[in-house]
Image: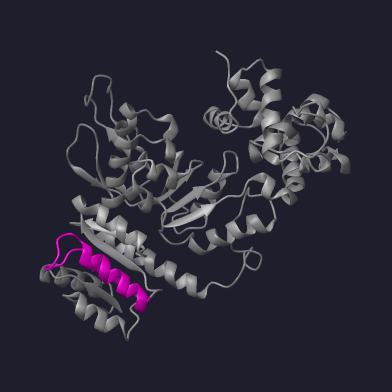
């Protein structure tokens, strides 16, 4: 049973009609008092509730009702309904335990998708007991290399939520493989045969955001010499991957939130709204919660994109996967260059397993490929890799007293020295983007002379 709580009879009527038409059992009530009487003794599958009632325009009564509902039925998913201008109420509701929110007036298709997603997630939370290992014949983990518990935990989460429409936020350091995880979410979803559209938000300027994301008509602005299809339209019926979400300008965050909330957008030069059916997967190496506190990232957008959060471990947290990754990168490089298969001495593998890897998997990949091509040997040993990596000394981290942070700082300093502070070369060697390198320099208080 789906419980609808709203003091507006027209909303109760329209929601009841829509849900019954979709073959759901519905019970609609007008007041918090009636709602509490139901949840005291009955566990609805889902609750749709308004945030404002006749006795309150501040939303306080709605927050109080939500807390009471969660007290009696903590596992029942709740979707909040509020006006666009009162999204801050929905954010408070999410903090109090609601699963999602939708603004009035809503798009029926978008609301039904949110309802189905909430129900599917709740069902899987209760019933999924099989592990990735037990279902590996069904779960497509192509290109994801490793068998560590940290990685298996990530894959198990993906397996549970992939075939829902839940928004997913993938977090983790640069180079940990966030794009591969996003692709796995898409490949294992019901949208797998539809487009997977990747967007690097860090590479889109504020002035080009609308044109890039929503498209434009010929003549919409000075340089619009032809029509352009935006990324959202390209991704219709499929998945859009918003990478580097933390780099998005505040003004663009508002525009993005509206599309994700209403699932409609307008092409520049065309005032007709266009509907879009997309699943949103985002990624960032920034701390969005900290950015929310600093008011550099919108709190309402944060809750919209992270219905499910998947955190990727750093490579130093899954060192047992390094030999598998080394073997994979070496085989791919040999195949691409027509070279015979190479082997690695135990000492080489031990050396590789104990490096600090500020650039994570991307750095390991660059190191393996560079060493293989430069040394051109059938068997690579530790000394071969030592010639290609910049360390404070040749000792591995388990043979000295430095912490991983200290080792990482020394590796960055030596690489800066070796490449005469050329940040582009340093970032490439370390397997970092320039933006991530800047953050590491700030983290370790490393100043670069102009």
Kindly identify the residue that appears in the image at 23 percent across and 23 percent down.
221
Q: How many marks?
A: 0
Q: Residue furthest bottom?
A: 41
Q: Is residue 254 above or below residue 30?
A: above
Verify whether residue 56 appears in magenta.
yes
The answer, for residue 198, to whether it is visible in the render is: no
Q: How is the image coloured?
A: one colour
Verify whether residue 223 appears in magenta.
no
Q: Residue furthest top?
A: 450
Q: Judge from the rendering whether residue 338 lies leftward or rightward of residue 408; answer left or right.
A: right
**Image location of residue 295, percent across then percent down:** 35, 41
Q: Quadrant of residue 95?
A: bottom left
Q: Judge from the rendering whether residue 445 lies leftward or rightward of residue 325; answer left or right.
A: left
The answer, for residue 57, to whether it is visible in the render is: yes
Q: Is residue 136 above or below residue 249?
A: below
Q: Is residue 425 above or below residue 39?
A: above
**Image location of residue 280, percent across then percent down:** 40, 50
Magenta residues, start to end: 46-73
Q: Quadrant of residue 120?
A: bottom left
Which quadrant is the N terminus positioned in? bottom left
Between residue 306 and residue 417, name the one nearer to us: 417
**Image location of residue 255, percent across then percent down:** 28, 40
Kindly identify the residue that appears in the image at 30 percent across and 72 percent down.
47
Q: Quadrant of residue 439?
A: top right
Q: Judge from the rendering whether residue 411 lies leftward or rightward of residue 91; answer left or right.
A: right
Between residue 113 and residue 30, name the one nearer to us: 30
Which quadrant is the C terminus positioned in? top right
Between residue 445 and residue 144, name the one nearer to us: 445
**Image location of residue 131, percent across then percent down:** 62, 67
Between residue 444 and residue 227, name the one nearer to us: 444
């Amino acid at each position: 049973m789906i419980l609808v709580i709203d003091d507006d009879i027209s909303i109760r009527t329209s929601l009841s009609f829509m849900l019954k038409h979709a073959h759901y059992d519905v019970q609609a009530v007008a007041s918090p008092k009636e709602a509490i009487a139901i949840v005291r003794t009955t566990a609805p599958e889902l609750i749709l509730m308004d945030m404002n009632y006749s006795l309150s325009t501040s939303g306080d009564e709605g927050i109080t009702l939500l807390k009471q509902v969660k007290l009696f039925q903590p596992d029942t998913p709740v979707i909040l309904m509020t006006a666009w201008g009162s999204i801050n109420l929905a954010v408070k509701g999410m903090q109090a335990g609601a699963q999602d929110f939708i603004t009035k007036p809503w798009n029926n298709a978008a609301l039904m998708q949110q309802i189905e997603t909430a129900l599917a997630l709740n069902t899987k939370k209760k019933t999924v007991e099989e592990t990735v290992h037990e279902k590996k014949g069904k779960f497509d983990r192509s290109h994801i290399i490793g068998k560590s518990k940290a990685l298996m935990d990530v894959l198990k989460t993906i397996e549970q939520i992939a075939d829902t429409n839940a928004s997913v936020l993938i977090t983790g350091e640069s180079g940990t493989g966030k794009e591969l995880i996003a692709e796995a979410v898409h490949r294992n979803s019901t949208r797998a045969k539809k487009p997977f559209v990747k967007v690097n938000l860090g590479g889109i300027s504020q002035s080009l955001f609308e044109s890039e994301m929503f498209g434009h008509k010929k003549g919409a602005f000075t340089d619009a010499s032809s029509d352009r299809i935006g990324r959202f339209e390209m991704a219709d019926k499929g998945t859009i991957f918003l990478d580097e979400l933390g780099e998005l300008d505040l003004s663009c965050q508002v525009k993005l939130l509206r599309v994700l909330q209403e699932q409609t957008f307008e092409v520049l030069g065309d005032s007709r709204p266009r509907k879009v059916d997309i699943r949103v997967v985002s990624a960032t190496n920034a701390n969005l919660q900290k950015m929310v506190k600093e008011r550099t990232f919108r709190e309402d957008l944060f809750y919209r994109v992270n219905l499910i959060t998947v955190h990727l471990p750093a490579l130093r947290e899954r060192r047992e996967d390094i030999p598998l990754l080394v073997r994979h990168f070496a085989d791919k490089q040999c195949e691409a260059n027509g070279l015979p298969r190479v082997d690695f001495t135990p000492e080489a593998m031990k050396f590789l397993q104990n490096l600090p890897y500020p650039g994570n998997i991307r750095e390991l990949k660059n190191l393996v490929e560079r060493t293989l091509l430069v040394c051109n040997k059938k068997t690579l040993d530790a000394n071969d890799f030592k010639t290609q990596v910049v360390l404070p000394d040749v000792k591995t981290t388990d043979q000295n007293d430095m912490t991983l942070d200290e080792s990482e700082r020394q590796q960055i300093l030596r690489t800066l020295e070796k490449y005469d502070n050329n940040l582009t070369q340093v970032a490439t060697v370390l397997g970092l983007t320039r933006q991530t390198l800047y953050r590491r320099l700030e983290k370790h208080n490393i100043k670069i002379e102009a």
